[in-house]
Image (tube, rainbow, N blue to C red):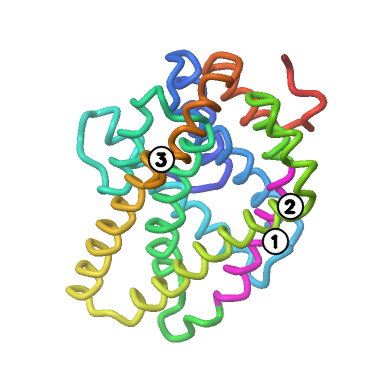
Amino acid sequence: MLDSIEAVIERLDGIVAEARAEQSPMGYFPGLYRRVTLTVRDAIEAGRFEDNERMEALDIHFAGRYIEAWEQIRRTEPPTDSWKAAFDGCADRRLIVLQHLLLGMNAHISLDLGISAAAVADPGRPLALKRDFMSINAILGDMIDDTQRRLTRFFVPLWFLDNLLGPADESLSLFSIEYARDKAWTQTLELICATDEERQALVLERDRKVAGFSSRLVRPPKWWMRLLLRTVRFMEKGDVAWRIGVLNEVAGADSIPL
């Protein structure tokens, strides 16, 4: 039972360690997610939210859905369709690191976030959560550039592309996160306003759509995108455990061990 953010971090540490020991791509997403959780914890401790206690409850519930999905897979039990699609993708060694990260983010943000936000919101004052909910975008935005630098450790040409585009690619990434979270906020309001029966139907429909989008992340519709991804995969350096370590390391990119 997760009852604190520290308990969440401890469990994520265990998941990352398991994945590194097994050289499993299933460790890419929790490696990144652990750093996000640490950043959110620090923001709560600094009092950056209007209701820090509620945000801690949201963070615990939200992380709990990912951890539950991980444990279901380890017990060979079926998780949600969204997480099944993400974990199935982890078995495909042809995917690049970024695809693995996007599969995890797709399941977690596009399905889990709305469910968790609805669970902790005050049904009588649902909009009271919105400002804190959206403020997470700024935290994620602050982490985009650092995450991109880490990805260049696996695929060096990304460094040149990043510098060529300047802030444009960071803006595009942030927009994508904001778009996904906007959709999650809409889902939150729908779930709060729905009856129990309607809520179950909404979650099942959302789960189906999110899982469907995962298939496009695994196999993009454009042939040239698939060719580009295969080229990147061929040029990626390091083994799985090392890459997970780069994504998971809390220190700045310059101090990440080779």
Disc 2 versus disc 3: distance between alpha carbons? Answer: 33 Å
Identified at 40% across, 22% down, the residue is 93
Identified at 45% across, 20% down, the residue is 18
Question: Which numbered disc, 3 or 1, marks the residue that appears first in the sequence?
Answer: 1
Q: Nearer the viewer, residue 107 or 113?
A: 107
List x then y, in percent, for residue 90.
Answer: 38, 29
The picture quadrant where one finds residue 75 is top left
Q: Is residue 158 above or below residue 83?
A: above
Q: Nearer the viewer, residue 154 or 18?
A: 154
SS at mark 2? helix
Residue on which the image places disc 3: 223
Give the overall secondary structure of the magenta segment: helix
Identified at 54% across, 29% down, the residue is 13
- Front label number (3 vs 1): 3
The picture quadrant where one finds residue 156 is top right
Query: Considering the image in quadrants, where does the N terminus appear?
Result: top left
Magenta highlight range: 129-145
Q: Is residue 116 left or right of residue 76?
A: right
Q: Is residue 1 visible?
A: no
Residue 170 on the magenta span: no
List x then y, in percent, for residue 103.
Answer: 42, 43
Residue on which the image places disc 2: 142
Q: Nearer the viewer, residue 258 or 11?
A: 258
Q: Is residue 145 left or right of residue 38?
A: right
Q: Is residue 160 visible?
A: yes
Amino acid found under the numbered disc labelled 2: Asp
Q: Are marks 3 and 1 in contact (CB under 8 Å)?
A: no
Amino acid found under the numbered disc labelled 3: Trp
